[in-house]
Image (tube, rainbow, N blue to C red):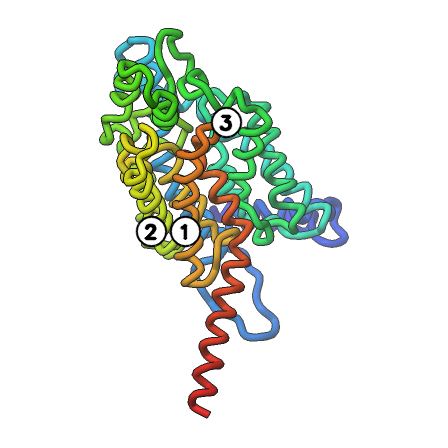
């Protein structure tokens, strides 16, 4: 590391004002601060010293995503070999998934960071580490068969429209990774739905539908073929597989177990809000229970409320998407309201509108929009209560 430090110190004058590559100062600074702790010191004012900065925060979130990423790679191989009827050991399954996932991760980072570097150069600003997390989240919410050029376009849209037009890191009103998924979903719907996209190179005779797709099909069979309904219910009967993640789905969203491991890391380090996570799960459970009591169709009666928390990207969204510190609420009471409404809306949309089975994305983006409004009313409520206390004392 000392040799690298000396090399950077030797080249640094070339990128400073008056140097040969002064226009690329933001790019050089980004690489330097990524490798080493910045040596900037405060000249005036009072500042708080803390071990946690943006780089460390983003690094912790990426580490929390590793279990979902690794299991996603394994599950891709598992689903593939299960589809073609071949036996394979754990390493073969993992390597197969690694080969499928790695290009998507590379495209996400290359395109996203490339655009961020370009905007930083144009503005003369330092490159922030915000995309370290978004660059990992985007591949994890994509289907394994997503064409790379579509991933690139979706990533570019998310960074430019979902982030940079608002001013960059810390200024966006929506979660950039969800903006990428939303763009992919609406621009290329055939690549985000159906049985083929969730399993890599699957056998034609093998059903690759996700449990969420099977659940949505229950509503169509109300009063229809009992045999068809029975077959669908069999796919939904194994809650353990749903919890572990041995089911078709987006790369990093299938394993609730791996996601909860990441949740423990985020909560233990104080990076993720446990209030939001808990409220999202509570909201989903309440809405699922209400539907169980109403029981208008088989989807409402045959899917236990707790199973909604295991289906689709519900758990992944609750832990990694809803807790985004930029686009979520900031007040303590606001976090409970925000999270509860996300869980409530996610289950409501997926049950009432079968055309949007993966409703977690829509629910979070919707509540991202209203997060500042929730905080506003919470703050105003606190102000009014304190004013009343002052009047009583007077």
Report the side of 7 relative to 321 (left or right).
right
Q: Give the residue displayed 57% in from the left and 61% down from the top.
A: 40
User: In the depicted view, which residue is nearer to us: 234 or 196?
Assistant: 234
Name the image quarter holding residue 163. top right
Callout 3: SS: helix
What residue does disc 1 label? 339
Q: Which of labels 3 and 1 is toward the front? A: 1
In which quarter of the view is residue 211 placed?
A: top left
Look at discs 3 and 2 and give the one toward the viewer.
2
Q: Residues within 10 Å of mark 1 (few under 14, many from 20)?
A: many
Number of numbered discs on residues:
3
Instruction: Give the residue number, with chain letter if any, for mark 3.
Output: 104
Q: Which residue is mark 2?
A: 278
Marks 3/1: CA–CA distance? 30 Å
Residue 383 lies, in percent from the top left, at: 50, 75
Disc 2 or 1, which lies upstream in sequence?
2
| Distance in Å between CA atoms under marks 2 and 1 | 8 Å
The answer to whether the residue labelled 3 contacts the one labelled 1, judged by CB atoms less than 8 Å apart, is no
Q: Secondary structure at mark 2?
A: helix
The x, y position of residue 154, in whole percent, is 58, 31
Q: Quadrant of residue 100?
A: top left
Earlier sequence position, callout 3 versus callout 2 = 3
- The reply, left or right, for residue 283 in relation to residue 331 is left
Is residue 271 shown left or right of residue 188?
A: left
- Comparing 143 with 45, the one in front is 143
Residue toward you, 305 or 352: 352
Please give the name of the residue rendered at 77% of the width and 52% of the height, measured from the top-left corner.
Answer: 18
Give the image location of residue 74, x and y in percent. 33, 25
Of the numbered discs in the image, which one, if any, rests on residue 3? none
Name which residue lies at 51% across and 39% down: 178
């Amino acid at each position: 590391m000392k040799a690298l430090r000396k090399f950077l110190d030797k080249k640094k004058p070339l990128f400073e004002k008056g140097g040969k590559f002064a226009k690329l100062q933001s790019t050089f600074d980004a690489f330097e601060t990524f490798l080493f702790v910045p040596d900037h010191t405060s000249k005036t004012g009072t500042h708080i010293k803390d071990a946690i900065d943006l780089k460390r925060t983003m690094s912790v979130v990426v580490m929390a995503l590793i279990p979902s990423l690794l299991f996603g790679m394994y599950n891709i191989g598992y689903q593939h070999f299960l589809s073609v009827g071949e036996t394979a050991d754990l390493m073969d399954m993992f390597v197969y998934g690694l080969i499928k996932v790695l290009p998507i991760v590379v495209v996400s980072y290359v395109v996203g960071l490339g655009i961020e570097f370009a905007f930083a150069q144009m503005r003369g600003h330092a490159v922030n580490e915000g995309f370290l997390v978004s660059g990992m989240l985007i591949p994890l919410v994509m289907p394994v068969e997503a064409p790379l050029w579509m991933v690139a376009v979706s990533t570019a849209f998310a960074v430019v429209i979902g982030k940079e037009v608002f001013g960059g890191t810390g200024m966006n009103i929506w979660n950039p990774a969800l903006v990428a998924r939303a763009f992919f979903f609406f621009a290329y719907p055939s690549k985000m739905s159906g049985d083929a996209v969730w399993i890599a190179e699957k056998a034609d005779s093998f059903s690759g539908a996700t449990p969420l797709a099977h659940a949505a099909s229950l509503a169509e069979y109300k009063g229809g073929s009992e045999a068809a309904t029975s077959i669908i219910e069999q796919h939904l009967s194994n809650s353990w597989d749903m919890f572990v993640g041995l089911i078709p789905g987006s790369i990093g969203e299938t394993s609730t177990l791996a996601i909860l491991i990441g949740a423990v890391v985020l909560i233990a380090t104080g990076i993720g809000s446990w209030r939001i996570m808990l409220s999202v799960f509570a909201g989903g459970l309440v809405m699922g229970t209400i539907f169980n009591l109403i029981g208008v169709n088989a989807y409402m009666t045959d899917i236990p409320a707790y199973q909604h928390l295991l289906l689709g990207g519900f758990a992944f969204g609750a832990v990694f998407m809803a807790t985004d510190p930029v686009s979520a609420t900031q007040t303590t009471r606001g976090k409970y309201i925000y999270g509860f409404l996300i869980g409530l809306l996610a289950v409501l949309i997926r049950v009432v509108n079968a055309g949007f089975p993966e409703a977690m994305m829509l629910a979070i983006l919707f509540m991202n929009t209203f997060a500042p409004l929730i905080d506003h009313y919470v703050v105003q409520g606190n102000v009014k209560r304190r004013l009343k206390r002052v009047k009583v004392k007077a």
